[in-house]
Amino acid sequence: LQMVIDLRRALERDEFCLHYQPKVSCVSGEIVGFEALLRWQHPTLGLVPPDRFIPLLEDTGGIIPVGAWVLRQACDQAVAWHRLGVGTPSVAVNLSVRQLQQSDLVALIRDELARSGLDPAALELEITESMLMHNVEDSIATLDALKQLGVRISVDDFGTGYSSLSYLKRFPLDSVKVDRSFVQDIVADPGDVSITRAVITLAHNLKLRVVAEGVETEAQLALLASNGCDEIQGYYFSRPIPVAETEAMLLAGR
Ligand code: G
Ligand code: G
Ligand code: NA
Ligand code: MN
């Protein structure tokens, strides 16, 4: 597969970049952080969407060096945001299951924090619910070690797996991201409102913040905010955008 060959060279050819999507406080309306999302600018195919190449990176093990690159870029970018003097937005990095199993993951993250000088509390690691459940005891051990670095940990795509929130109590978590499949129909579907409200209540009882993903309309935002959701992410506020636009957005105070 030509794409696998191209993907192997993409890192050294500097073809990856990160786009960033803001997370916004439901209370203040301010940007509290950005999620880093990997993009591949292929020399002839153009911008390849992540769902076409991230599974390939995971299968080939390429996600280990690329994931390290993402982490480095994201830490440096968060330091750059802080230097703008407009608050302290956090940066969220997605981890793949391979990275979570990587024996030197904790050392890698510790080293990147030290190298970049980023406040560990400004780095958030997003781990999907299904990844956590893949190997529970190992996940707990790794997350405990990561947590000791002072970083924050978020459960991504929450609600799509089989775990219950009470089960999640075993992991040292800071927030849950309600999957966008629940947010999508929240205005029309009372069932999805009930689920989301229950998730928010339980998460708060466990001292976890709640982020809703995929918010596209004002009506969705209003419903989430009135039910106590802490933060939102989605096209309603902004699509994932290139670095230069994040800086302009922060400087504009929006
Ligand atoms: O914007 P979007 O199409 O970028 O992202 C698609 C999927 O790719 C999401 O599920 C997201 O979690 C995943 N993804 C994006 N960037 C990264 C990354 O840097 N590492 C990993 N492991 N997954 C990523
Ligand atoms: O799995 P993860 O939560 O990391 O996925 C993030 C993905 O969701 C990215 O592909 C991103 O582009 C996409 N996304 C972000 N906001 C919205 C939104 O409001 N609507 C839709 N449909 N997708 C979104
Ligand atoms: Na994510
Ligand atoms: Mn998600």
Image (cartoon, rainbow, N blue to C red):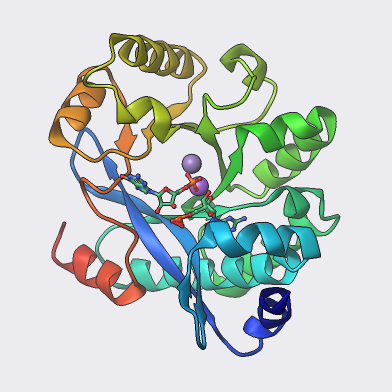
- Where does the C terminus fall, quadrant-wise? bottom left
**Which of 193/224 is in front?**
193
Indicate left or right for 141 with 122 as reference. Answer: right
Residue 37 sits above or below residue 129 on the image: below
Where is residue 87? Give x, y as percent: 28, 58
- Where does the N terminus fall, quadrant-wise? bottom right
**Which of 169/83 is in front?**
169
Residue 174 in view, yes or no: no
Where is residue 174? Give x, y as percent: 52, 33
Residue 216 sits above or below residue 170 on the image: below
Residue 45 sits above or below residue 196 on the image: below
How many numbered dots are placed on residues in this image? 0
Where is residue 171? Give x, y as percent: 67, 28
Residue 9 in view, yes or no: yes
Where is residue 17? Give x, y as percent: 48, 75
State which quadrant residue 253 falls in: bottom left
Which residue shows up at 41% across the image and 66% down it?
19
Which residue shows up at 79% across the image and 28% down it?
136
Which residue shows up at 76% across the image and 57% down it?
105
Indicate left or right for 63 with 223 as reference. Answer: right
State which quadrant residue 224 falls in: top left
Residue 143 sits above or below residue 77 on the image: above
Q: Residue furthest front?
A: 1
Indicate left or right for 123 with 178 as reference. Answer: right
Which residue shows up at 82% across the image and 55% down it?
102
